[in-house]
Image (spheres, rainbow, N blue to C red):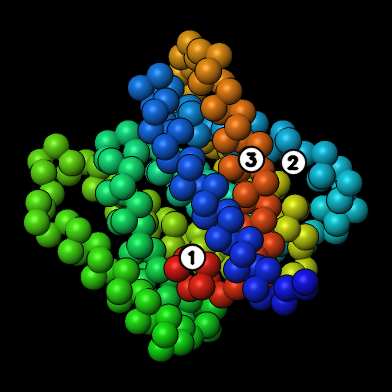
Amino acid sequence: MRFSPRLLAILQALFVTFLWSTSWVLIKRNLDEIPPLTFAGLRYSLAFLILSPGLWRHRAEVRALSAKEWRSLVILGLVFYTLTQGGQFVTLKHLEAVSFSLLLNFTALLVAIFGIFVLKEMPSRLQWWGIIIFIIGVIVYFSPTGIRGGQLLGFAFAGFTVLANAMAAVLGRSVNRSAKISPLVVTAISMGVGAAFLLGSGFAVQGLPSISPSAWAVIAWLAVVNTALAFFLWNKTLRILSAVESSII
Protein backbone atom coordinates (compact mmCIF):
# COMPACT_ATOMS: atom_id res chain seq x y z
CA MET A 1 0.00 0.00 0.00
CA ARG A 2 1.47 3.33 -1.09
CA PHE A 3 0.61 6.61 0.59
CA SER A 4 0.43 9.91 -1.23
CA PRO A 5 3.21 12.37 -0.27
CA ARG A 6 0.66 14.56 1.50
CA LEU A 7 -0.83 11.72 3.56
CA LEU A 8 2.65 10.48 4.43
CA ALA A 9 3.59 13.98 5.61
CA ILE A 10 0.48 14.14 7.80
CA LEU A 11 1.24 10.71 9.33
CA GLN A 12 4.85 11.73 9.98
CA ALA A 13 3.70 14.98 11.60
CA LEU A 14 1.29 13.08 13.84
CA PHE A 15 4.08 10.68 14.85
CA VAL A 16 6.39 13.59 15.67
CA THR A 17 3.63 15.25 17.70
CA PHE A 18 3.24 12.04 19.69
CA LEU A 19 6.98 11.94 20.39
CA TRP A 20 6.98 15.57 21.51
CA SER A 21 4.01 14.97 23.81
CA THR A 22 6.00 12.28 25.62
CA SER A 23 8.91 14.72 25.94
CA TRP A 24 6.96 16.98 28.26
CA VAL A 25 6.37 14.22 30.79
CA LEU A 26 10.07 13.35 30.86
CA ILE A 27 11.11 17.00 31.05
CA LYS A 28 8.68 17.84 33.85
CA ARG A 29 9.89 14.91 35.96
CA ASN A 30 13.53 15.96 35.75
CA LEU A 31 13.35 19.76 36.08
CA ASP A 32 13.89 19.56 39.83
CA GLU A 33 17.27 17.96 39.15
CA ILE A 34 18.38 19.85 36.03
CA PRO A 35 17.84 23.62 35.53
CA PRO A 36 15.65 24.27 32.46
CA LEU A 37 18.09 26.13 30.19
CA THR A 38 20.93 23.73 30.95
CA PHE A 39 18.54 20.80 30.42
CA ALA A 40 17.46 22.16 27.03
CA GLY A 41 21.04 22.97 26.04
CA LEU A 42 22.27 19.46 26.83
CA ARG A 43 19.37 17.86 24.96
CA TYR A 44 19.80 19.84 21.76
CA SER A 45 23.61 19.87 21.83
CA LEU A 46 23.68 16.08 22.06
CA ALA A 47 21.11 15.84 19.27
CA PHE A 48 23.27 18.11 17.11
CA LEU A 49 26.29 15.85 17.68
CA ILE A 50 24.19 12.89 16.56
CA LEU A 51 23.21 14.71 13.36
CA SER A 52 26.74 16.01 12.67
CA PRO A 53 27.89 13.01 10.58
CA GLY A 54 24.99 13.77 8.25
CA LEU A 55 26.40 17.25 7.70
CA TRP A 56 29.69 15.71 6.66
CA ARG A 57 27.91 13.55 4.09
CA HIS A 58 26.14 16.67 2.80
CA ARG A 59 29.27 18.86 2.97
CA ALA A 60 29.01 19.83 -0.71
CA GLU A 61 25.49 21.12 -0.12
CA VAL A 62 26.62 22.98 3.02
CA ARG A 63 29.47 24.67 1.12
CA ALA A 64 27.03 25.71 -1.60
CA LEU A 65 24.70 27.52 0.81
CA SER A 66 24.34 31.20 0.01
CA ALA A 67 24.72 33.99 2.57
CA LYS A 68 20.94 34.45 2.52
CA GLU A 69 20.36 30.74 3.22
CA TRP A 70 22.87 30.80 6.08
CA ARG A 71 21.12 33.82 7.54
CA SER A 72 17.75 32.07 7.33
CA LEU A 73 19.11 28.95 9.06
CA VAL A 74 20.76 30.97 11.84
CA ILE A 75 17.56 32.94 12.49
CA LEU A 76 15.54 29.71 12.43
CA GLY A 77 17.93 28.18 14.96
CA LEU A 78 17.70 31.14 17.33
CA VAL A 79 13.90 31.35 17.15
CA PHE A 80 12.99 27.66 16.92
CA TYR A 81 15.50 26.27 19.41
CA THR A 82 16.93 29.01 21.63
CA LEU A 83 13.69 30.95 22.15
CA THR A 84 10.93 28.38 21.54
CA GLN A 85 12.46 25.23 23.01
CA GLY A 86 14.26 27.11 25.77
CA GLY A 87 10.98 28.86 26.54
CA GLN A 88 9.18 25.53 26.76
CA PHE A 89 11.62 24.18 29.35
CA VAL A 90 11.38 27.35 31.44
CA THR A 91 7.58 27.40 31.18
CA LEU A 92 7.30 23.76 32.27
CA LYS A 93 9.28 24.71 35.37
CA HIS A 94 6.49 27.11 36.40
CA LEU A 95 3.34 25.65 34.83
CA GLU A 96 1.59 22.29 34.59
CA ALA A 97 2.27 20.41 31.36
CA VAL A 98 -1.46 20.04 30.54
CA SER A 99 -2.11 23.76 30.95
CA PHE A 100 0.88 24.69 28.81
CA SER A 101 -0.11 22.18 26.14
CA LEU A 102 -3.54 23.75 25.85
CA LEU A 103 -2.12 27.27 25.71
CA LEU A 104 0.05 26.25 22.76
CA ASN A 105 -3.17 25.89 20.74
CA PHE A 106 -3.04 29.67 20.36
CA THR A 107 0.00 29.07 18.13
CA ALA A 108 -2.29 28.03 15.28
CA LEU A 109 -4.13 31.37 15.35
CA LEU A 110 -0.90 33.38 15.27
CA VAL A 111 0.55 31.16 12.54
CA ALA A 112 -2.57 31.67 10.43
CA ILE A 113 -2.24 35.45 10.75
CA PHE A 114 1.55 35.53 10.22
CA GLY A 115 1.29 33.05 7.34
CA ILE A 116 -1.15 35.23 5.42
CA PHE A 117 1.25 38.18 5.38
CA VAL A 118 4.64 36.44 5.35
CA LEU A 119 4.04 33.24 3.38
CA LYS A 120 0.96 34.28 1.39
CA GLU A 121 -0.72 31.05 2.58
CA MET A 122 -4.44 31.58 3.16
CA PRO A 123 -6.04 29.05 5.56
CA SER A 124 -9.16 27.30 4.31
CA ARG A 125 -12.55 27.81 5.95
CA LEU A 126 -12.26 24.37 7.57
CA GLN A 127 -8.86 25.27 9.03
CA TRP A 128 -10.27 28.51 10.47
CA TRP A 129 -13.06 26.54 12.12
CA GLY A 130 -10.52 24.10 13.54
CA ILE A 131 -8.54 26.96 15.05
CA ILE A 132 -11.70 28.48 16.56
CA ILE A 133 -12.70 25.15 18.12
CA PHE A 134 -9.23 24.76 19.65
CA ILE A 135 -9.38 28.24 21.18
CA ILE A 136 -12.89 27.72 22.54
CA GLY A 137 -11.65 24.53 24.20
CA VAL A 138 -8.81 26.43 25.88
CA ILE A 139 -11.19 29.13 27.15
CA VAL A 140 -13.61 26.52 28.50
CA TYR A 141 -10.77 24.68 30.26
CA PHE A 142 -9.42 27.75 32.06
CA SER A 143 -12.63 29.71 32.68
CA PRO A 144 -13.86 27.83 35.81
CA THR A 145 -10.68 28.41 37.82
CA GLY A 146 -8.99 31.35 36.15
CA ILE A 147 -5.30 32.04 36.69
CA ARG A 148 -3.97 31.59 40.20
CA GLY A 149 -1.46 34.10 41.50
CA GLY A 150 1.33 31.55 41.67
CA GLN A 151 0.89 30.76 37.98
CA LEU A 152 1.31 34.30 36.64
CA LEU A 153 5.00 33.84 35.87
CA GLY A 154 4.30 30.53 34.15
CA PHE A 155 1.60 32.09 31.98
CA ALA A 156 3.93 34.97 31.09
CA PHE A 157 6.60 32.52 29.93
CA ALA A 158 3.92 30.54 28.10
CA GLY A 159 2.76 33.65 26.22
CA PHE A 160 6.32 34.40 25.13
CA THR A 161 6.82 30.78 24.04
CA VAL A 162 3.58 30.70 22.04
CA LEU A 163 4.68 33.82 20.14
CA ALA A 164 8.15 32.37 19.50
CA ASN A 165 6.60 29.05 18.45
CA ALA A 166 4.37 30.78 15.91
CA MET A 167 7.31 32.70 14.48
CA ALA A 168 9.33 29.47 14.30
CA ALA A 169 6.52 27.69 12.44
CA VAL A 170 6.42 30.41 9.79
CA LEU A 171 10.21 30.56 9.50
CA GLY A 172 10.45 26.77 9.27
CA ARG A 173 7.86 26.65 6.50
CA SER A 174 9.61 29.48 4.66
CA VAL A 175 12.95 27.64 4.72
CA ASN A 176 11.58 24.19 3.85
CA ARG A 177 8.82 24.76 1.30
CA SER A 178 11.24 25.57 -1.54
CA ALA A 179 12.92 22.17 -0.95
CA LYS A 180 16.28 23.71 -1.93
CA ILE A 181 17.99 22.62 1.29
CA SER A 182 17.75 19.00 2.46
CA PRO A 183 15.84 18.42 5.72
CA LEU A 184 18.94 17.03 7.43
CA VAL A 185 21.01 20.13 6.65
CA VAL A 186 18.18 22.42 7.78
CA THR A 187 17.75 20.45 11.00
CA ALA A 188 21.43 20.07 11.89
CA ILE A 189 22.59 23.63 11.19
CA SER A 190 19.63 25.39 12.80
CA MET A 191 19.76 23.03 15.78
CA GLY A 192 23.50 23.54 16.19
CA VAL A 193 23.08 27.31 16.29
CA GLY A 194 20.17 27.19 18.72
CA ALA A 195 21.81 24.58 20.94
CA ALA A 196 25.02 26.61 21.25
CA PHE A 197 23.12 29.62 22.56
CA LEU A 198 20.96 27.45 24.84
CA LEU A 199 23.92 25.63 26.37
CA GLY A 200 25.97 28.80 26.73
CA SER A 201 23.17 30.71 28.45
CA GLY A 202 22.35 27.69 30.61
CA PHE A 203 25.91 27.32 31.86
CA ALA A 204 26.25 31.09 32.37
CA VAL A 205 23.00 31.54 34.29
CA GLN A 206 22.32 28.15 35.89
CA GLY A 207 25.58 26.21 35.73
CA LEU A 208 25.98 22.45 35.35
CA PRO A 209 24.55 20.54 38.31
CA SER A 210 25.35 17.00 39.36
CA ILE A 211 23.20 14.84 37.08
CA SER A 212 22.20 11.30 37.99
CA PRO A 213 22.61 8.38 35.54
CA SER A 214 18.83 8.12 35.17
CA ALA A 215 18.61 11.81 34.21
CA TRP A 216 21.41 11.35 31.67
CA ALA A 217 19.42 8.45 30.22
CA VAL A 218 16.43 10.77 29.83
CA ILE A 219 18.60 13.40 28.13
CA ALA A 220 19.99 10.76 25.77
CA TRP A 221 16.52 9.46 24.87
CA LEU A 222 15.20 12.97 24.28
CA ALA A 223 18.23 13.83 22.14
CA VAL A 224 18.19 10.73 19.94
CA VAL A 225 14.49 9.96 19.46
CA ASN A 226 12.49 13.05 20.40
CA THR A 227 14.94 15.55 18.92
CA ALA A 228 17.33 14.28 16.23
CA LEU A 229 14.77 11.94 14.65
CA ALA A 230 11.67 14.01 15.40
CA PHE A 231 12.94 17.37 14.14
CA PHE A 232 14.39 15.78 11.00
CA LEU A 233 10.97 14.28 10.20
CA TRP A 234 9.25 17.55 11.08
CA ASN A 235 11.37 19.54 8.63
CA LYS A 236 10.53 16.95 5.95
CA THR A 237 6.80 17.47 6.54
CA LEU A 238 7.19 21.24 6.21
CA ARG A 239 8.12 20.73 2.56
CA ILE A 240 4.51 19.67 1.94
CA LEU A 241 2.29 20.88 4.79
CA SER A 242 1.46 24.56 5.16
CA ALA A 243 2.43 26.43 8.32
CA VAL A 244 -1.19 26.40 9.56
CA GLU A 245 -1.61 22.67 8.89
CA SER A 246 1.54 21.81 10.82
CA SER A 247 0.60 24.08 13.74
CA ILE A 248 -2.88 22.52 14.00
CA ILE A 249 -1.37 19.02 14.02
Labels in figure, total = 3
Res. 51 mark: 2
Left or right for 182, reference 18: right
Left or right for 137, reference 150: right
Residue 201 visible to the viewer: no
Left or right for 8, reference 204: right
At 13% from the left and 49% from the top, the residue drawn is: 147
Furthest-front residue in this view? 1
Residue 215, image x and y in percent?
Answer: 51, 20
Residue labelled with disc 1: 249
Q: Nearer the viewer, mark 1 or mark 2?
A: 1
Task: Using the image as rendered, state which of residue 142 and residue 108 is in the foreground.
Answer: 142
* Quarter where residue 30 is shown: top left
Q: Nearer the viewer, mark 3 or mark 2?
A: 3
Residue 241, image x and y in percent?
Answer: 60, 73
Q: Earlier in the sequence, mark 3 or mark 2?
A: 2
Residue type, label 2:
Leu
